[in-house]
Amino acid sequence: MSETSTPSTPRTPDTASTPSTPDTASGGSGSRTAPGAPGPAAPGAPAVTVRVPAKVNAQLAVGGLRPDGFHDLANVFLAVGLYDEVTAEAAEAPGISVTVTGPDADQVPLDGTNLAVRAAELLAAHHGIEPRVRLRIAKDIPVAGGMAGGSADAAGALLACDTLWGTATPRAELLAICAELGSDVPFSLVGGAALGRGRGELLTPLAVGGVFHWVFAPADGGLSTPAVYRECDRLRTASGTGATSADVPDPEPSGPLLAALAAGDTPALAAALTSGPAGTSNDLQAAALSLRPSLARTLAAGAAAGALAALVSGSGPTTAFLAASADGAERLAAALRSSGTCRTARVATSPAAGAAVTGAGG
Ligand SMILES: C[C@](O)(CO)[C@H](O)COP(=O)(O)OP(=O)(O)OC[C@H]1O[C@@H](n2ccc(N)nc2=O)[C@H](O)[C@@H]1O
Ligand SMILES: Nc1ncnc2c1ncn2[C@@H]1O[C@H](COP(=O)(O)OP(=O)(O)OP(=O)(O)O)[C@@H](O)[C@H]1O
């Protein structure tokens, strides 16, 4: 996603809420639902809760700047077991409202720019129905952290509303709506592991032969994804390699990295995560470090504490550390927490399942 955000309205520290008027241009008003056809659930219908994972990019190979402002990628997504929960509940009044709870709630927008609200609007428009829904986001994924938290909420809202409204949208149509919402959103729906081509939205599932143990260290404050891509282009231009698709080689997935994932081979994955001339599989890492030099200290602290590999997660500033075992991950997390180089440290495993309905009712 994009910028870190400052709340424009006062709110209680751990909870935020605002109504968002449906966007008439995207079909929010003027129901075209035929009698008996699927439509917004009646008030009193059970609420639907969807759990959605965060991601780490095991490889992020970035091609040149395209004329449309995006970059072609070879993006090896891995879903990790840190989750947001999105609940959709039928509302009597037309419109979409959203509340957010969790430690980073005050950094999440509550207007029509919230990706979960946009997802509900797009789904309603797709079916020509008037949205009437209250969305509740329980946020555990770091905001603006390079772990696709906003994308997770978008995918979660899409699945929760599709279930609540009984619209039974075919998977291919859901994925097309996801791609409209953002490059990472299709993967948030699918989860597991996948290779993302194009701008990251064209997914091919990948085999994963075992469980990988990670530690994630969120930083204070977020990084803007577009700013990190711009910095990547600037560094390439400054080094004389050029920045456009005409100058930069097409990004390709790493064979050894895909083989390590398929085999569930942690040491081989560690080697692949830290290979290449820049010592990382993440082409955005240098740009994230250039914008946030203090991340170098976090990476060094994790490496000194025994991480098998240390890298920036996607566009950052969250840093990711591979451990040999669950115990090793706990020890590494404790060392990172006491290093004073990050806000906290969380353990999680991959792969994790994609967006899934976990409950109805309540
Ligand atoms: C860094 C990653 O998280 C890695 O998975 C993604 O590439 C970012 O995906 P995202 O947050 O869903 O990004 P989008 O909302 O699609 O795009 C936000 C902005 O990031 C930049 N962007 C994004 C994806 C891409 N392949 N090339 C880009 O240059 C563009 O400036 C774009 O306007
Ligand atoms: N539901 C949401 N949750 C979090 N941020 C949101 C949401 N909707 C919109 N945003 C906006 O998106 C920005 C980036 O949030 P997000 O947590 O998705 O970043 P990210 O994890 O770095 O994204 P990515 O890894 O996909 O590049 C936030 O600063 C906020 O302004």
Image: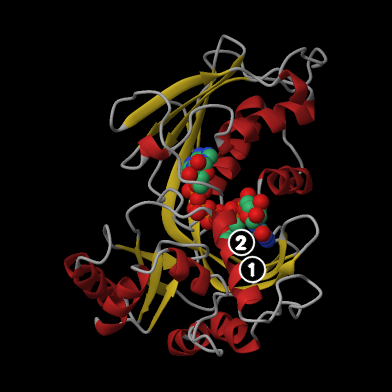
Q: Are marks 1 and 2 in contact (CB under 8 Å)?
A: yes
Residue 240, horizontal then vertical, whole percent: 67, 81
Q: Is mark 2 within 8 Å of ligand 1?
A: yes
Q: Is residue 94 left or right of residue 359?
A: right
In the displayed structure, does residue 166 sit left or right of residue 13? right
How far from the left and from the top, in percent, is residue 167? 72, 30
Residue 52 seen in the current view: no
- Percent of width and height locating residue 136: 45, 30
Q: Residue at x 27, y 77 (%)?
A: 301
Give residue 194's quadrant in the image. bottom right
In-front residue for pair 74/168: 74
Q: Can the viewer see residue 250?
A: yes
* Residue type of the residue flagged with mark 2: Arg
Q: Which residue is drawn at 44% across and 70% down?
A: 289
Label 1 environment density (alpha carbons within 10 Å; few <14, some 14–19, many ≥20):
many
Q: What residue type is labelled 1?
A: Asp
Q: Going 48% across and 89% down the picture, which residue do you hit? A: 271
- Colour mode of the rendering: secondary structure
- Above or below, comparing residue 230 to residue 32 in the picture: below
Q: Which quadrant: the C terminus?
A: top left
In this view, 218 is above or below 86: below
Considering depth in this image, is 351 or 223 the residue closer to the camera? Answer: 223
* Residue 307 screen position, x and y as percent: 33, 81
Q: Mark 2 points at which residue?
A: 230
Q: In this view, does 316 lie to the left or right of 217?
A: right
> Mark 1 to mark 2: distance in Å?
5 Å
User: Label 2's element?
Assistant: helix
SS state under label 1: helix
Q: Mark 1 points at which residue?
A: 233
Q: Residues within 10 Å of mark 2 (few under 14, many from 20)?
A: some
